[in-house]
Amino acid sequence: MSHRYPRSSGILLHPTSLPGPFGIGDLGPSAHAWVDTLSKAHQSWWQMLPLGPTGYGDSPYQSFSTFAGNLNLISPELLVRDGLIREQEIGNVQFRDDRVDYLAVEPFKMRLARQAWENYRNGRTAHLKDAYEAFVHDKQDWLSDYALFMTLKEARQGEPWYEWPTEFRRRDTSGAVLAFAEEELSDELGTYQFGQFLFFRQWQELREHAHASGIRLIGDLPIFVSPDSADVWSNPRLYLLDDSLRPRVVAGVPPDYFSRTGQLWGNPHYDWEAMRATGYAWWKARLKTTLEMVDVVRLDHFRGFLAAWQVEAGETTAINGKWVPGPGADLFREMKSAFGDLRLIAEDLGEITPDVFALRDELGLPGMKILQFAFDSPKNQFLPHHYPTNCVVYTGTHDNDTTHGWYATAPEKERDFCRRYTARDGSDIAWDLIRLAWSSVADLAIAPLQDVLDLGTAFRMNLPGTATGNWHWRMPATGLNDWAASRLIEMTEVYGRKQVESAQPAPIQS
């Protein structure tokens, strides 16, 4: 199954990086303006990182829930428009606009969510009553657990759930947990549930605007979930935990391009036998929720479904681990049975074995080609002359340095081969690689906005293996300037990636 996606291109930009006056990008006017910008620049795709509520290190890949949305993305302006808060209730707040200041943003957005919930309960927005009640009913499989988890977490001053008192840690829902929450914390429970209603309401409006503008959305589904999450707390039997409900083994990757000691992620491993016994019900629910938000899903760490790197809990690096088999094709057969066409992109990077490529090809999934990894040899499979059409080419990803920064620090041998391969002198390296991606046979070509804007290392999104200082980058208020937009338009037209103008996005082929 090849040629699933029409020849097209797009930009990687997480919504937190959008400009705006409230300290973080959100789902309001700047997001809608960004969709318009993509459309005017003849792009077809907006790719982003996971959208869940961020936990440890502010990382989108360490979320408190794989189902919930990030309340930091709620737009105050849309809350005012919908009558959920008054403009004066926002307050005279000031934030820095050059980076996300999570310590200031999080309490501000929670205050607005509480105010919106209070105003709703007081009858200010009676027109939303039916919509909210329908939302609570539709999301009941995960929403009440998430709200309860976050409410208890707040009551425990943010303490990880596996350090809570036993009756809360083991989620004794017939007794102390529910009684305590319902009697003492009902307002907080309502705030977290209503906050999710607000997020998904604003998100669906944005998605509809994107579709009307000919833009499709590429989301991101991390293979693992955070140890401190509603997912693990409410379903501990699905994970390899010890008697005290702490992970027996944790996830990571062995030494690689990004780290000489590997990456120790710390996520619990799944009990795949327990998952299989349920027909992978949790995974089906997870993918269903994600596909209700986006059009295509980048499946993070695809190789982990064949075998994942398992490290004993307590290790300080990922060196002393081992590969442990995953569910393999069995999981994807169940997924295909449930969803039919699998609208996935396989993140097939890292230490890849032939069985990983075999499963990817059996499923007809496009893999990822990263140009920054390509220039050590003419035989390197990340070079465009090796590509199949059914793949997605990137100049770099959220984990890479910007292309400008990469070239500045790359070994001279790679820089020389890159100049020879592109027939350029390297003075415009970010756009040299964008041209290489756009001109390739890959069905999809994606560039991080930092590369389109030709930004240096200081503007990268993430440095793998580091726990702090990441995920803060915000685009300039000027956005995609005329110079960059005109180059993007020209390249997209010249290399045949402009989709036929239509009120709807080009269809995904099967």
Image (cartoon, rainbow, N blue to C red):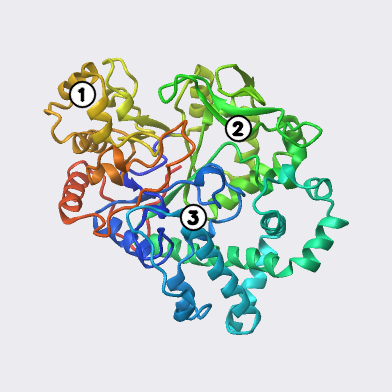
The residue identified by callout 2 is 266
Residue 174, image x and y in percent?
87, 56
Kind of residue indicated by mark 3: Leu
Q: Nearer the viewer, mark 2 or mark 3?
A: 3
Front residue (pair 357, 433): 433
Q: Are marks 1 and 2 in contact (CB under 8 Å)?
A: no
Q: Residues within 10 Å of mark 2 (few under 14, many from 20)?
A: many
Residue 465, image x and y in percent?
47, 30
Residue 493, image x and y in percent?
19, 47
**Residue drawn at (71%, 59%), measured in percent from left and top?**
144
Secondary element at tag 3: helix
The residue identified by callout 3 is 103
Is 442 left, or right, of 354 in this rendering? Answer: left
Q: Tell me which corner region of the image, top left, top right, bottom left or bottom right, holds residue 170.
A: top right
Secondary element at tag 2: strand
Q: Nearer the viewer, mark 1 or mark 2?
A: 2
Kind of residue indicated by mark 1: Cys
For the residues labelled 1 and 2, the Cα–Cα distance comes to 36 Å
Q: Sequence-wise, which precedes: disc 1 or disc 2?
A: 2
Is 245 left, or right, of 33 in this rendering? Answer: right
**Residue drawn at (36%, 30%), measured in percent from left and top?**
369
In this rendering, is residue 413 above or below 26?
above
The numbered dot on residue 315 is: none
The residue identified by callout 1 is 418
**Residue drawn at (44%, 79%), measured in percent from left and top?**
87
Q: Sequence-wise, which precedes: disc 2 or disc 3?
A: 3
Q: Residues within 10 Å of mark 1 (few under 14, many from 20)?
A: many
